[in-house]
């Protein structure tokens, strides 16, 4: 069976030439603009895409082609996309490679060079798919590219398997860096929608005045700069999954529109009057306390309940036990291959430092530290220094001022004395070698509040109080 090749170019002459040259080896699918490219990409699932940067409505500029590249990679991050540009646009082609394109070719295209590049691209794509399939079969600790043997993660995997068989909205909760987007992608790949698009958007990364258009699309002339009709991400994820990260940052007016879409799968583009019905699954995520946001009136309660039909909590890395070491070794192996460093290994001090670190940035922090360490490592050994973590025995003690140290000692002595004497002031003051008024002043300074007033306590040597830290 021939691999599928998608060619995106508005020049009919070039399309005809490429089809004639490549038809014996590939199933050719073509598109002339960005909307057509997205539609064909989702329908054909091409092994490789050839993308001209100069697309309508501004074929002499690269913005539309770069936007098409971003849209296609949002649908499939592993997509192999080769961009095509004129010699004068070479800097834009390089920018495209930096944004995720596999390679680029300059016009006029050398057919032999193109054929060679396509064969290599298809070969790499097949290798990657084969590797992922093999890993899934051989390793019980890998689930849809997510790694974890801890009970917490095995529970998450079980939830994903169950919820994937439905079309119910899912709300993913967890600290930043815990893998919420990976979990959303796993839900998509395990579902009947896996052949549709998976599109992710961070609601906090797009200006409020553009977010509605980005989600719901707009009609031509809807606002200044709307030169053509444009489909939004909801339409582009039809029959697939739309992942809304940082859902708590959604502006109020868009919350209303999203609520309506969740209720009946209908919406209108910005500037439009036609009702559009789309079958798209919504998976949302947040690292904030969404219930607290609802209580403060910043997020609609009815939208919260629509989104939170199923709630899955992603555990922080510090609560995943031996997963941290498992992940560290996996990342080290991956980055060692990428950096052509062969077999790297952690030193005992590095492993101890990894186990002790609290990982406030979670899996993302671990991944970044291991990547840097892979680059910095010498002699095939990764040390705690390479990870920028303190080795065993050299933990840093936070430095305190003399005043802070003194107050800490005073607080501990006062609280312990009061505890030993069941909260009675007179014997506690006697033990500490101070008068009762002095002890009261010390309690005020340290923020230890008493249940009765000073006057009452002074008159009653057996007065009690409540010990609280400020």
Image (cartoon, helix red, strand yellow):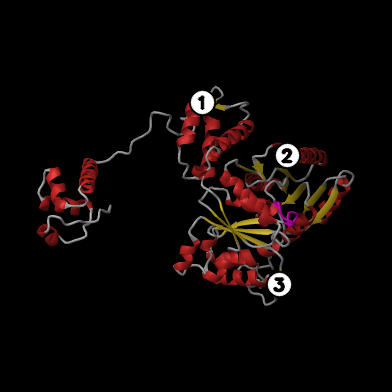
Q: Is residue 375 above or below residue 65?
A: above
Q: Nearer the N terminus, badge 3 or badge 2?
A: 2
Element carrying mark 2? helix
Q: Pointer 3: residues within 10 angstroms few (<14), some, or many (20+)?
A: some
Q: What x and y, as percent, mark residue 23?
A: 88, 47
Comes first in the chain, label 2 or label 1: 2
SS assignment for the magenta stretch, majority = loop
Q: Secondary structure at mark 3?
A: strand
Q: Secondary structure at mark 1?
A: loop
Query: In what quadrant of the picture does the N terminus appear?
Result: top right
Q: Which residue is disc 1 drawn over? A: 347
Residue in the picture at 60% in, 70% down = 259
Is residue 354 shown to the viewer in this render?
A: yes
Query: Is residue 2 covered in magenta?
Result: no
Q: Is residue 194 magenta?
A: yes
Q: Residue at x 77, y 51 (%)?
A: 45
Q: Which residues make up the magenta segment?
A: 189-196
Instruction: Give the alpha-carbon distance from disc 3 to disc 2, as whole Å.
Output: 41 Å
| Residue 40 spot, x, y in % from top left | 78, 57
Q: Residue furthest top?
A: 379
Q: Are there few (<14), some (14-19), or many (20+) residues within 10 Å of tag 2?
A: few
| Cα–Cα gap, marks 2 and 1 | 30 Å
Q: Residue furthest bottom?
A: 273
Q: Nearer the viewer, residue 70 or 250?
A: 250
Which residue does the numbered mark 2 point to in the structure image? 137
Say which mark, if any, is on residue 85: none
- Counting from the top left corner in percent of width and height, residue 25 is at 87, 43
Q: Residue at x 58, y 64 (%)?
A: 211
Question: According to the image, label 3 marks what residue?
Answer: 276
Residue count near mark 1 (Cα–Cα under 10 Å), binned few <14, some 14–19, many ≥20 = some
Which label lies toward us, 1 or 3?
Answer: 1
Q: Earlier in the sequence, mark 1 or mark 3?
A: 3
């Amino acid at each position: 069976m021939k691999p599928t090749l998608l060619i995106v170019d508005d020049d009919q002459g070039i399309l005809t030439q490429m089809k004639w040259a490549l038809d014996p080896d590939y199933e050719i699918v073509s598109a002339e603009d960005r909307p057509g490219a997205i539609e064909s990409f989702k329908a054909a699932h091409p092994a490789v895409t050839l993308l001209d940067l100069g697309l309508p409505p501004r074929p002499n500029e690269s913005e539309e082609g770069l936007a098409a590249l971003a849209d296609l990679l949002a649908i499939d991050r592993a997509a192999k996309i080769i961009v095509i540009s004129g010699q004068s646009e070479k800097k834009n082609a390089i920018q495209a490679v930096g944004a995720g394109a596999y390679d680029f070719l300059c016009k006029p295209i050398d057919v032999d060079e193109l054929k060679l590049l396509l064969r290599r691209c298809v070969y790499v794509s097949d290798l990657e798919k084969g590797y992922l399939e093999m890993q899934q079969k051989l390793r019980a600790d890998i689930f849809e590219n997510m790694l974890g043997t801890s009970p917490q993660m095995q529970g998450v995997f079980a939830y994903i398997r169950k919820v994937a068989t439905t079309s119910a909205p899912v709300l993913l909760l967890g600290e930043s860096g815990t893998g919420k987007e990976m979990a959303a992608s796993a839900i998509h790949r395990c579902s009947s929608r896996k052949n549709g698009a998976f599109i992710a958007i961070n609601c906090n990364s797009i200006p409020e005045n553009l977010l509605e258009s980005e989600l719901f699309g707009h009609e031509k002339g809807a606002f200044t700069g709307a030169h053509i009709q444009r489909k939004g991400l909801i339409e582009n994820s039809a029959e697939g999954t739309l992942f809304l990260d940082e859902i708590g940052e959604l502006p109020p007016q868009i919350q209303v529109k999203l609520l309506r879409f969740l209720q009946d799968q209908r919406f209108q583009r910005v500037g439009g009057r036609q009702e559009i019905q789309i079958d798209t699954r919504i998976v949302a995520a947040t690292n904030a306390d969404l219930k607290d946001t609802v209580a403060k009136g910043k997020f609609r309660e009815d939208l919260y309940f629509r989104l939170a039909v199923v709630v899955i909590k992603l555990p922080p890395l510090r609560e995943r036990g031996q997963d941290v070491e498992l992940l560290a070794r996996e990342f080290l192996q991956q980055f060692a291959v990428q950096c052509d460093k062969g077999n790297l290994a952690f030193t005992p001090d590095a492993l101890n430092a990894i186990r002790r670190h609290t990982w406030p940035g979670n899996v993302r922090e671990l991944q970044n530290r291991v990547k840097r360490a892979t680059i910095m490592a010498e002699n095939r050994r990764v040390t705690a220094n390479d990870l920028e973590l303190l080795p065993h025995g050299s933990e840093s003690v936070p430095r305190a001022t003399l005043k802070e140290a003194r107050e800490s000692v005073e607080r501990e002595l006062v609280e312990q004395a009061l505890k030993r004497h069941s909260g009675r002031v007179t014997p506690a003051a006697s033990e500490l070698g101070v008068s009762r008024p002095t002890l009261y002043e010390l309690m005020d300074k340290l923020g230890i509040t008493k249940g009765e007033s000073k006057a009452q306590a002074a008159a009653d040597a057996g007065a009690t109080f409540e010990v609280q830290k400020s």
